[in-house]
C-alpha cells in the first residue's frame, strides 16, 4: 500500500472551556487534534482557525499556525498550547482547517472537566485528497 | 487547493432533552450543528428536520429553516435556538439535512446535563458532493 | 439534488450493558442506530448482527432482523428493543450491518448509565454505495 | 452486494490512562478497536502503533502486532491486552494503523474511569481501499 492519509482536513467543532476542575495537565479541559504522519517524509501543516465573528487567525492579519509532524510520528496537538502567532481564545466557538504537504490522518478529541466529572468526545475529522 | 467541503450533509441523530441541571447557557442540554464556511462566498443553507411520526419541518407545511453562514466564518448552530418557521420539540427524536449553495463542513455536537454530570458527544456528519 | 444516503452501512461497535441506574426509558443504558430515510419510498432494511464467538444472528439459523423506515421519516432504533428473530444479548460485544433497498443515513449512538452519571457516544457509521 | 469494508484503517487518537476507579474489566480505563470481518475468509491484520517520540512498534525493531479476525466475526480488541511483541505503554499518546488482507470495518471506542464517573467516546476510523 501507499502511505495512508489525505492532505486537507477540517474539524468544524472547537471550543476550549476556560474552567477546569483539575490542575493535572491530563485533566485540564482541552481540545486536541491528533495528527498521524505514517509516511517517510516530515509533514508541514498549515493550521487556520476560523471564528464566528472575526477573520480567521492566519488570514489576513497573521500567517497560519505552522506545525511539523515528523516522519512516522503522531502529534496530539492541544489547541490550548498554541501561542504563535497568537493563543486560541477560551469560551469561544471556532473551527480548524489543516493543509499538509504529505498525507496525514486527523482525529478530533476533547476533554471537558468544567465539573468534577470528566467528559470525552472524539471523531475522525472531515478530509479531502 | 479549492475550498474544502461538500454541499449536502446529514445528522441522523437528534434529541434535545427538556431537562438541564444548569441555567448557564454553556451547560444547558443542547444539540449543535457546527458549520464551517471556509470559502469566499456566503453559504445559504436550507435545513430540513425529519421526525419519526410526522412530516418533516419544511415539507410540506413550512419552508425549511434558512441559515446564512458568512464567508470565512463558523456557525455553531444550536437546535434549541431555532424558532422560524417553528421551534424544535424537546424529548423528541429527529434527524437533520443540510443543503448549501457552496461547500461547507458540518460536525454534530451534543451536551447532556439532565443530571449534574455533563456528557458530551461529537461526530463528523455524513456528506455528499 | 437526489436523495441523500447510501444502501450499505456498518456499526462495528456494539455492547448493551445489563446494568442501569435509572428506570426512565430515556436513561436506561442502550445502544441506538439512528436511521434517516429522506426519500420518497419506504426503506426496507435487513439488519445482521455479528458476534465474537458465534454465527451472526440472521445467518444461517435465522433470517435477519427486518426493519421498515417509512418515506421521509427517521427511526432511532434501540437494539434493546429488538425481539424478532431473537433479542440481543447483554454484556456481549457485537457489530451490526444494514442493507437497505433505498439510500439511508445511519448514525450510531449510545448511552451508558451503569453508574449514576450518564455517558454518551455517537458516530456516523461506515457506509458504501 | 459484495463484502462490506476496506483494507486500510487508521485511528489517530490513542491514550490508555494508567488509572481506573474500578477493578471490573468492563470498567477499567481502556481503548478499543472494534473490528468487523463480515466476509467469508479470515482477516489477517497487521497492526502498527505510532508514537510521538520513538519509532513505531513493529518498525524497525519488531514485527507488527498480528491479529486474526475469523470470518463472520467481530473482535473488540483492547489495546490494554496487547502483549506481543510488547505491551502498549500507559499515559502515552499513540496512533494505530491496520492493514488487512480482506475488507474489514474498524471503529474506535474508549472508556475513561480515572474518576468514578465513566466517560465514553467512539468514532468510525479513517479508511482507504
Image (cartoon, coloured by chain):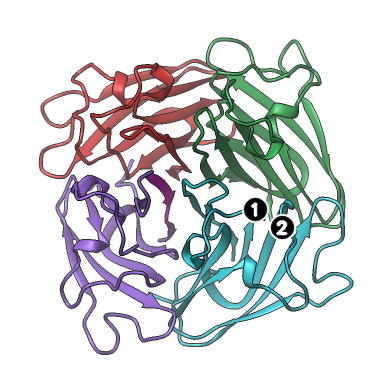
Chain colours: A red, B purple, C cyan, D green
Tell me, yes or no, if residue D127 can be seen here. yes
Q: Position of residue A116 (x, y in %)?
A: 37, 32
Q: Position of residue B46 (x, y in %)?
A: 25, 70
Task: Answer with left or right where residue B1 lies relative to residue D1.
Answer: left
Q: Is residue D38 above or below residue C67?
A: above
Residue under label 2, please give it: C90
Q: Residue at x 54, y 53 (%)?
A: C21
Q: CA distance from mark 1 to mark 2?
A: 6 Å
Dots 1, 2 in contact, CB < 8 A: yes
Does dot 2 land on a helix, a strand or a loop? loop
Q: Residue at x 54, y 74 (%)?
A: C103
Chain letter for mark 2: C
Label 2: few (<14), some or many (≥20) within 10 Å? Answer: some
Task: Answer with left or right where residue C64 lies relative to residue A16.
Answer: right
Chain letter for mark 1: C
Q: Nearer the viewer, residue B27 or D123?
A: B27
On whether residue B13 falls in the magenta region, the answer is: no
Label 1: few (<14), some or many (≥20) within 10 Å? Answer: many
- What residue span does the magenta drawing correspond to? B119-125
Q: Earlier in the sequence, mark 1 or mark 2?
A: 1
Residue under label 1, please give it: C17
Amino acid at each position: 500500500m501507499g502511505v495512508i492519509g489525505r492532505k486537507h482536513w477540517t474539524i468544524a467543532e472547537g471550543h476550549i472551556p476556560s474552567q477546569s476542575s483539575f490542575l493535572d495537565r491530563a485533566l485540564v479541559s482541552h481540545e486536541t487534534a491528533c495528527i498521524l504522519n505514517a509516511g517517510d517524509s516530515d509533514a508541514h501543516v498549515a493550521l487556520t482557525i476560523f471564528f464566528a465573528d472575526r477573520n480567521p487567525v492566519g488570514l489576513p492579519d497573521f500567517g497560519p499556525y505552522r506545525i511539523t509532524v515528523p516522519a512516522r510520528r503522531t502529534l496530539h496537538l492541544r489547541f490550548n498550547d498554541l501561542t504563535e502567532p497568537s493563543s486560541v481564545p477560551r469560551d469561544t466557538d471556532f473551527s480548524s482547517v489543516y493543509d499538509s504537504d504529505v498525507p496525514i490522518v486527523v482525529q478530533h478529541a476533547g476533554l471537558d472537566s468544567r465539573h468534577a466529572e470528566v467528559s470525552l468526545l472524539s471523531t475522525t475529522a472531515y478530509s479531502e485528497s
